[in-house]
Image (cartoon, rainbow, N blue to C red):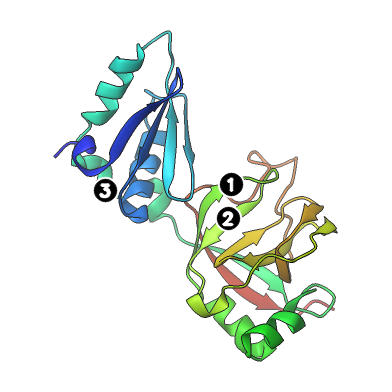
Amino acid sequence: MKLADRFMVELLGDDCIRISGAAVAELRAVSSNLRNSEDWLAVVDGIEDCVVQFDPVKYLPDEALGLLSGLTEDMLVAGSEELEEPLDLAVSFSQADALDLKDISAALSLSEDEIIQRLVSAELRVDMMGFTPGFAYMSGLDDSMSVPRLKTPRQNVPAGSLGIAGGKCGTYALAGPGGWSIVGRVVSPLFDPERENPFLLKNGQRVRLKRVDVR
């Protein structure tokens, strides 16, 4: 079976190809394996698709499309990103850090402890990075945890803040504006310019939240 038999594979502009139309888990396995190949300049995950950039000097658009479409089902085997152990993130759910926890508790008719328990029990996965540098969109929240974005976004959300909105969980690596409901703060820096990879989270990474008390 070829990749094009299972996915929609289409040209996007002059040097990119979009892959979509299959189960997200399969799509992530493909994108992980493509990132480990030297044939492509970049592979960028979206929520339900991924975009592959090719070198237009090396390949004509139809050649790149044919190469990608013709890849075999071996690409569906979990890539290295999928096999990594989940990253544990220590999170403070104190009143000072969980700015919207009380309001979410009232909106969902759940106690604050119930909300925290559902967060730490979730098997999260980074679906994509975006919005601001290092912001991680993560899936895996229980359906009961879906809340809308804030009606009035904050002008400044503290770095490390953990938010939820629209059934997703998100982390603010940098301080800045944002409209997600803030339920806690990741204690370890999500951005460190001295690290080889300055941003702690990446596409495809599995994540677990761990409750910690910060005094």
Tell me how far mark 1 sits from mark 2, CA to CA: 6 Å
Q: Residue at x 32, y 54 (%)?
A: 23
Amino acid type indicated by mark 3: Val
Q: Quadrant of residue 179?
A: bottom right
Helix, strand or loop status at disc 2: strand
Mark 2 closeness class: few <14, some 14–19, many ≥20 residues within 10 Å: many
Residue 32: x and y, percent? Answer: 39, 42
Q: Does 34 sit left or right of 5 as displayed?
A: right
| Contact between labelled residues 2 and 1, with CB atoms less than 8 Å apart | yes
Mark 1 closeness class: few <14, some 14–19, many ≥20 residues within 10 Å: many
**Is 142 situated above or below 37?**
below
Residue 178: x and y, percent? Answer: 76, 56
Q: Quadrant of residue 84?
A: bottom left
Q: Does 17 sit left or right of 186 as displayed?
A: left
**Residue that carries the numbered disc 2 in the rendered image:** 137
Amino acid type indicated by mark 2: Tyr
Amino acid type indicated by mark 1: Met
**Is 39 situated above or below 49?**
above
| Contact between labelled residues 3 and 2, with CB atoms less than 8 Å apart | no
Which of the two discs, 1 and 3, labels the residue nearer the N terminus? 3
Nearer mark to the viewer, of 2 and 3: 2
**Residue that carries the numbered disc 1 in the rendered image:** 129
